[in-house]
Image (cartoon, rainbow, N blue to C red):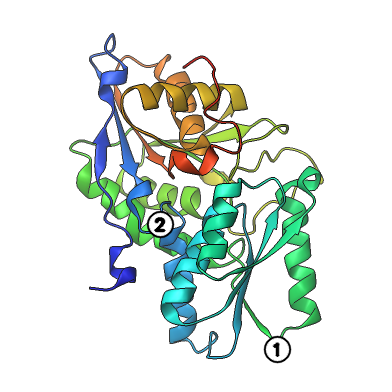
Amino acid sequence: MNLLDLVGNTPLIDLSFLYPNHPGLQLFAKAEWMNPGGSLKDRPVKQMLCSAVEQERLIPGKIILDSSSGNAGISYSMIGAAMGYDVTIVIPGNASQERKLRLIAHGATLVETDALEGYDEALRHVHFMYEAAPEKYFFCDQYTNTENINAHYFGTAAELIEQVPCPITHFVGGVGTGGSLTGIARRLKENYPDVKIIAVRPERWPGIEGLKPLGEPEDIVPKIFEAEYVDQWVDVSADEAKGCCLKLAHYGYFVGQSSGAYLAACNKVATRLTEGTITTLLCDLGERYFSAGLWAHGNSC
């Protein structure tokens, strides 16, 4: 077994105890922080890079290049190091310090963009870098790479279907690149035609790391995101996400901001249900957000 063999097949956690007054409701979440890079992003990065090697698009001497809010950058730097490739990541300046240090620890080169311009500025800049030197880089482009979707269609979603002990009625997720929501939704709807796909929409400022707000004309919508799979959008604030992170921590689960946002959306969905099986993802580790103030005093959800 090697490092890449550790990616995927994460455990399923039963969080139904969060709804003691709703005995007909079940909530299950995939423990994605148990991937070796500590996040869900290990799955698509492994899939995209291995596919590129097989197709001889990623060859020795090329530098792996992409933009990231942080977690995918960690996956690129970790897996790139394991495969013997240099990695350059374009990252917003407001990404947490813990993420940046993990990238550097694996030997990656960081290019930081203006924090006030958000993730879209990092997206624009990585395209500029690649277009200026295409012979130098393998631009993986997680926002357009269909192997991103495949990683979740064949991996994450298939595991959910196998692990959840009853038919899934709802899935709650968000849009970063759109790969996880699209791949999981596609597979779940094939198996459970009546499943409802709930998409989390974070507030624009201060935002929620890893999730795109969307909704404005200037927003860059990831090309691989298939919005037609979404049955409902649920708005979640950064404070609501933080509150749910604190609540989970009180039960021993120490997860990051997007996981808190997903749980907040699950709670909003649950208020309208008397029975059902809600599924979601706990995307990454809480340790990545100390410098971002996530664990400062606040109220739980």
Query: SS at mark 2?
Result: helix
Residue beneath the point at 61% across and 27% down:
238
Question: Looking at the image, which is closer to me, 6 or 222?
Answer: 6
Q: Amino acid at mark 2?
A: His
Residue 236 visible in the snapshot: no
The residue indicated by pointer 2 is 152
Q: Nearer the viewer, residue 291 or 239?
A: 291
Instruction: Report crowding for label 1: few under 14, some 14 to 19, many 20 or more residues within 10 A (C-alpha).
Output: few
Does residue 62 appear to the left or right of 79 in the view shown? right
Tell me the quarter of the image containing the N terminus.
bottom left
Please report whichever mark, 1 or 2, sits nearer to the chain's N-terminal start. Answer: 1
In the image, residue 284 sits, relative to residue 199, either above or below, namely below
Q: Is residue 132 visible?
A: yes
Residue at the disc numbered 1: 135
Q: Residue at x 44, y 70 (%)?
A: 79
Q: Where is residue 35 shown, x and y percent of the image?
A: 35, 55
Left or right of 229: which side holds 214?
A: right
Alpha carbons under labels 1 and 2: distance apart: 30 Å
* Residue 41: x %, y % from top left: 47, 56
Q: How many marks?
A: 2
